[in-house]
Amino acid sequence: MKNDEIISLFKQASGYLKSTELVQNKIHSSTIQTLLKQGKIERIKRGLYRLPPDLLAQHDFFPMTILMPPLRSPRGCFVSLQHLNYAKKYGEKYKV
């Protein structure tokens, strides 16, 4: 698979791909290492890669930042700021 095809695969996935997804698409680990050295992708953590922000359009970059927490911690949970403020304000009253 050519580098341009790999980049378009990343763009279809909002800029992030796991190594398992890369392997499923028959992308060899040496190709991943080459793209890392060229700066065309970045390693977030072991098994998770992303496109650098300059390779994405501005409107594509915002959803990536929203998707980042579940990719980094798939067993984590989301707590909205509104819920945190509510707990801070009323937590003592309701023993939160």
Image: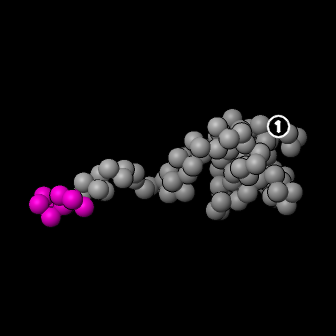
- The x, y position of residue 24, in whole percent, is 70, 42
Q: Is residue 20 visible?
A: no
Residue type at mark 1: give it.
Answer: Glu
The residue located at (79%, 42%) in the rendering is 7
Q: In which quarter of the image is the C terminus?
A: bottom left
**Residue on which disc 1 sits:** 5
Q: In which quarter of the image is the N terminus?
A: top right
Magenta stretch bounds: 88-96
> In which quarter of the view is residue 87 placed?
bottom left
Q: Is residue 54 left or right of residue 79?
A: right
Count of numbered marks: 1
Considering depth in this image, is 5 or 82 the residue closer to the camera? 82
The residue located at (11%, 60%) in the rendering is 93
The residue located at (71%, 50%) in the rendering is 53
The residue located at (82%, 57%) in the rendering is 39
- The x, y position of residue 29, in whole percent, is 79, 55
Considering depth in this image, is 81 or 43 the residue closer to the camera? 81
> In which quarter of the view is residue 36 placed?
bottom right
- The x, y position of residue 81, in whole percent, is 36, 53
Query: Is residue 46 positioned above or below 62 on the image?
Result: below
- The x, y position of residue 61, in whole percent, is 64, 44
Helix, strand or loop: magenta stretch: helix
Mark 1 element type = helix
